[in-house]
Amino acid sequence: MVIGLSSNKPMNELFGFLLSGITVGFIYALVGIGFTVIYNSSGIINFSQGEFVMAGGMSTVFLLKAGLPLGVSFILAIMITSIIGIVLYKLISYSKDSSQISLIILTLGFAIFLRGLAEVVFDKELHTMPSFVGDGSFDMLGTVLTYQSIVIMVVSIVIVVLLYFFFKKTKTGQAMKAASINVDAARLMGINIKKVLMINFALSAAIAAIGGVLLTPITSTNYEVGIMLGLKGFAAAIIGGLSNPFGAVVGGLVLGVLESLIAGYVSSEYKDAVAFVVLLAILFFMPGGIFGNTKAQRV
Amino acid sequence: MLKIENLSCNYRQIIALSDVSLHINRGEIVSLIGANGAGKTTLLRAISGLQNTKKGKIYFEGSDIAKLESHDIAKLGIVQIPEGRGLFSILSVEENLRLGAYIRSDKDVQNDIEKIYIQFPILKEKRKEYAGTLSGGQQQMVAVGRALMSRPKLLLLDEPSMGLAPIVVEEIFRAIKELRDKGTTIFIVEQNAFLALSITDRAYVLENGKIVMSGNSNELLRDERVKEAYLGA
């Protein structure tokens, strides 16, 4: 496809693809941040991350159906998902075999368990929910931008900024960062590693849940929506270097935009393949991610 | 202040310490010397709770701490500068110092950081730089400073001279002596026996996980067996 300069239409189309790519990209970023936060503190890749997204979205849908207001459902869903994160941490901490590979398999098993649980507790149907700010939209640069997209972008940016300040400026955040750099030294400083790990799992789950709630009005949700979202988030984290939460944000945006462009200009059938092609390319050619963070080779 | 009774530890199925007993009095500076692999680091790790003990007791100010978690031991006032210094390499010098005060909740932390800067002026210059980018000597200063930030009752040092130029070692040891003069109790593990014996009050000699000798440092300095095995005379 050639982007003509004489007509505005192709440009508008491009802006449209970019905006929808960025919107979804922020969700991938939120899932990806969860991967990095847990990986940094424990060396584990948590394959339940996508199911945390699902749990957030599905819980909100069903709490709304039960008649609770949106705000309350939102907050309760985040709390429920955080508790699920803590349960996963407890399973990991009581595991007899503490090798990383068996703990990673444990997170995979937990993901399958959560999917099954969601199928039983909720159902197998596809659910959606109204946008938080109404279904309105406005024209921007000749393309349509929905209010929900704006909410997703704003909330995601706020979360990233808050996270940055949390890790940089608060005592708990610094302790978590210290523990991710040198566990033994952190313990010698009086930092309770078990508490740090638990906070990390709860935090990752909460961020994923927020992603799930934000995304539901746009793409709907069901019990197995976490599989694909988890893999996309994982790809986002890998692109960013796996140990850098802010790298995951860039990774998520890159992935979202690429997907949207491929879907728009080639075929939407190839959309999901993008994540895997990018994932493989990064692992082959830049195993440290696009920021070349050598900490990815953890010992 | 610290009393270890019949402590035994395994490290990866190998006996690392067997029946080690020693004590450190308040205000003393004591060293543990021994060859590489004698079990010195294991002993320090056991005191700090980083290493599981198999049997024996570790008393600190009268209570057994052998089964406590590391962070609880740190809260009691035992701080360790581990082998290799254990800095948070991708945090700034000042962030490292502030983390040293993690167990404190008082308002004097910033004041104490300024005091560390007076003792080691170079750290003030580099306070915004990543600790990992500093030279070995400067990193050791950060490690000492960070340990002091917790206001320790007992300071454990694992090989403070390792990998440092002699002139830097002198500076670090001068700082350690000053600390002792201010009343901090110090336990140093050192491979450099001459250095350790020349600044400590008493010393223990560890060989293959067992204490084989102990006594006043200046007596050990003159001991024929110590001279032959550790002082290269």
Image: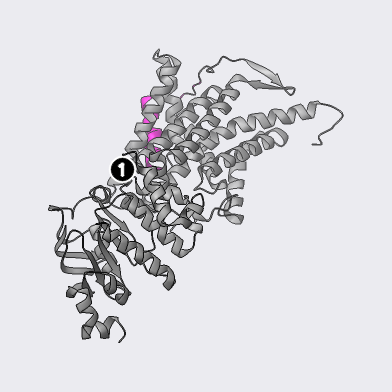
Horizontal side of B47 relative to A286 (left or right) equals: left
Q: Residue at point 25% right, 47% down?
A: B75
Residue B85 lies, with reference to residue A280, above or below; the image says below
Q: Looking at the image, can residue A16 be seen?
A: yes
10 Å crowding of disc 1: few (<14), some (14-19), many (20+)? some
Q: Which chain carries label 1?
A: B
Q: Is mark 1 on a helix, strand or loop?
A: loop
Task: Tell which of B224 and A80 is nearer to you.
Answer: B224
Residue A68 lies, with reference to residue A85, above or below; the image says above
Q: Residue at point 30% right, 73% down?
A: B37
* Quadrant housing the C terminus of chain B: bottom left
Give residue B156's position: percent from left, percent from top.
28, 60
Identify the residue at the far top of this view. Answer: A67
Residue under label 1? B104
Give residue B53's position: percent from left, percent from top.
20, 60
Q: Residue at point 71% right, 37% down?
A: A266
Give residue A82's position: percent from left, percent from top.
38, 32
Horizontal side of B167 relative to B47 (left or right) equals: right
Task: Tell which of B153 and B95 is nearer to you.
Answer: B153
Horizontal side of B223 relative to A35 (left or right) equals: left
User: Is A224 contained in the magenta span?
Assistant: no
Task: Tell which of A222 and B207 is nearer to you.
Answer: B207
Q: Looking at the image, can residue B164 be seen?
A: no
Q: Is the magenta stretch mostly helix, strand or loop?
A: helix
- Magenta residues span A107-128
The colouring scheme, among rainbow, by chain, secondary structure or one colour, is one colour
Q: Which amino acid does label 1 sit on?
A: Arg
* Quadrant housing the N terminus of chain B: bottom left
Q: Residue at point 46% right, 52% down?
A: B93
Give residue B181's position: percent from left, percent from top.
27, 60
Residue A3 lies, with reference to residue A278, above or below; the image says above
